[in-house]
Image (cartoon, rainbow, N blue to C red):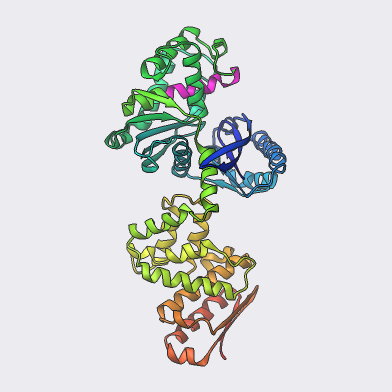
Amino acid sequence: MFAAVDLGSNSFRLHIGEPAGGRMHIVRTARDPIRLAAGLDKDNYLTDAAMRTAVRTLQDFRAILDEYTLDAVRVVATNTLRVARNADQLLPQLEAAIGHPVEVISGEEEGRLIYMGVARAIDKADERRIVVDIGGGSTEVIAAIGPDITLVESFGIGTHPQNANFFADGRITARRFDAAVTEARARFEDAAGLYKAQGWDAAYGSSGTMRAIAEVLSKNGIGDFTMSQASLHALRDILLELGHVDAFTLAGVKKERVPVMVGGLTVLIGVMQELGIERLTAINAGLRLGVLSDLELRAASCDRRDAAIRACMRRFGVDGQRAMRTAGIASKMFEKLEPEDARHPYLCWSAMLHEVGLAISMTGSHKHGAYIVEHADLPGFTTREQRLMGNLVLGQKGNLRKVREALYELELAKAVLALRMAVVFMHARADGDVEGLRVRMKATRIELDLPRELLAKHPTLSPWLVKEEEAWSEIGIAFQARES
């Protein structure tokens, strides 16, 4: 049984799901429409009140999670925590409240997870489709064929900025509405050609805003009852006639969600006009189902992050054989250091990508590589995970001052040491002779015992180890390599 917690810009939501018979059965849900995006001030700082509300909501969610025996829990945060300038202040409080790490995912990763949920719900393996998800702070558009994504982009426009910029006082006029649609079209204009080139047999809308609009259209017999451009413009005309969000009383949407729906409608009309989508179908699947599906895959050892690493290696022409050798040595070295948890996938992934910077320059390749790993689009990875791997790649050689902060955590320091030793032994072509050595690391001391025959067999090891001694001593850690 798995749990997905979605910290969205409009609402915080929780899904608990149990896979059975190839489907994910939702056994519990919770929602709090906290409107986190509305808590951003003009400088993109979350107010104290907004942060307190967010913490209280996650405390309530934790009480629900504690009722179940769960195999895995994943908490993801989207656009508002991507743009909030004081997110680093709030995240530790949220993690303490929910009892699990909070992952601020990129817009592209959000789109991929959304599509995982949609693809799970649509049993049409060969259908060429486009999916639009309008959230509180961003809109994700995904083109795909069956389960395979061909294009995913996140656009910085959502229900909250549209409502705040054009309908803050609740009044709805033709001038305001049309200006909001024009603003939306401008956001999608540059990418429209790319999506049109993909083509699609069907178009879907996956967010709560989409479902609310669909409900209003169908329950009130507006237009042709579907999410066609004609029906959306008919809904627009009704809103203009009413003139204010408070006057909207049609069935299908709660009164407090009417402003969200209005802002979302302007984005929806804009994206459909710009991309040439005539009709959308609202679907009750998206980010949370995608997160649950991803957790299920990880439990089955089908982690899509492995595929992301391999794709990045291909993209930058990494020598796969050297990468595998380095990863193998790093894993053995890390085990010898007796870490709290011998499994360290980030170490292996970092080792696989440790030479990615060679695609830019031989000089300072570890610095180029660290930047690539931290900022590349790696499906399945969070910003925090990529920053961690970037630090490992950066610390693979040279001075250690640049990763000093990472070394304060002993387990991470062991990973840095393991990767550095792996690089040394790989270059010295000594990867087949690491079983006989011993290595220990404490807060201020590293001891490396090497068989005498190993040093004789691989003479280039000694100068490498001298450089290591100098690098570690610069940051106050004694490094002693001895023959045994």
Percent position (x, y) of residue 91? 62, 46
| Direction front: furthest residue | 21
**83 up-or-down from 31: above or below:** below
Q: x and y percent of residue 377 in the render?
A: 41, 50
Evaluate whether residue 262 shows in this view. no
**Eyeballing the image, is 234 above or below 137?**
above
Residue sitting at 41 percent across and 62 percent down? Answer: 369
Would residue 73 be found to the left or right of residue 126 on screen? right
| Residue placed furthest toward the top | 241
- Give the percent coordinates (x, y) of residue 357: 38, 63
Q: Which residues are magenta?
A: 255-267
The number of numbered badges drawn on the structure is 0
Queried whether the magenta region covers residue 264, the answer comes back as yes
Spot occupied by residue 3 in the image (x, y as percentages of width and height): 61, 43
Q: Quadrant of residue 318?
A: bottom left
Left or right of 6? Residue 138 is left
**Residue under the point 63% across and 44% down:** 90
Helix, strand or loop for the magenta stretch, by majority = helix
Is 478 colored magenta in this rendering?
no
The C terminus - image quarter: bottom right
